Image: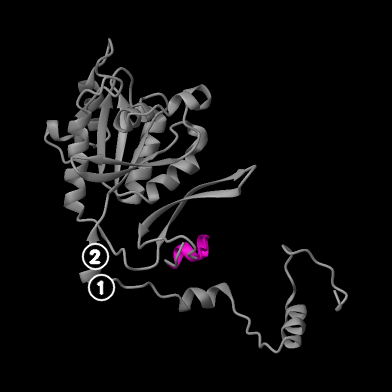
Amino acid sequence: MNLGVIVSINQRLDAEVIELVANEYGHEIEFTTAESINDEEKDEVDDPNDLEPRAPIVTVMGHVDHGKTSLLDHIRSANVASGEAGGITQHVGAYEVMVNGKKITFLDTPGHEAFTAMRARGAKITDVVIIVVAADDHIMPQTKEAISHAMAAGVPIIFAINKIDKDGADPERIKQELASMNFLVEDWGGPYQSQDISAKKGQNVDKLLEKVLLQAEMLELKANPKRPALGAVIEASLDKGRGYVTKILIQNGTLNIGDPCCSGCLFWQNQSHV
């Protein structure tokens, strides 16, 4: 204010004002650019002796109303869909469950076409993707889109053919449609795992989870709990009482209460601490 500059706490200062204020307090200022930070940032290399097995991150994707959230409801023995508008998931949720003494982290992503960007973000931070397809329906455009996201992310795909208990269900037709897209399931001699399930009744869900654990073992997923936390922001929202609330999925390291955090495209690209 003594310099004749009236600004709020959130406004940016130009370089000249910054230098004047810093000199007043006896500090030297060095200006840098995003490009130079990008060059200087180094990824922290973990000691192999510190690595420990970690839970696989599983993203559940597919067309709207094909049973993605119903599948997670059965796994978690809780009802999420009833709290959503029209029973359609509108946020990306993360849930950790115990299966045969091992942990699996599930991401539930919206299946509606309006949430394309959110679904794409879900596929980028996952280890395994479960594509849910209703046995009484067909391979829908959003299903194909979900498959393309998973393929672009380069993660293994497991097909869950749901609603096999309904009249008119034909899992073999779904497998035929997948085969026409060059996705040959194991039952047909292909490399892709699939499981016929009924999410509402819980039929064969345990077999699906066993295939997820088998896929995770093949990936040999490990992380270092002794390093600062590194992860990805799943979603952020504005809470009336708490302000901005961010849901973060930690992928490596340990996040302790009081740890400083930073996030953004620049930091994520450079594998800095999120």
Which quarter of the rendering shows the N terminus?
bottom right
Q: Is residue 101 above or below residue 269?
A: above
Q: Any magenta on residue 16?
A: no
Q: Any magenta on residue 269?
A: yes
The numbered mark at residue 249 is none
Q: Is residue 46 above or below residue 57?
A: below
Image coordinates of residue 254 in percent, x first then y, are 37, 61
Image coordinates of residue 234 in percent, x first then y, are 46, 48
Residue 223 relative to residue 256: left or right: left
Comparing 53 with 59, the one in front is 53
Q: Please give the residue where the numbered disc 2 appears in the rendered image.
A: 51
Image coordinates of residue 175 in percent, x first then y, are 22, 27
Comparing 249 with 30, the one in front is 249
Three-letter code, disc 2? Leu
Residue at position x 44%, y 26% in the image: 81
Q: Is residue 114 above or below residue 162?
A: below
Q: CA separation, marks 1 and 2? A: 7 Å
Q: Please give the residue where the numbered disc 1 appears in the rendered image.
A: 47
Residue range highlighted in magenta: 260-270
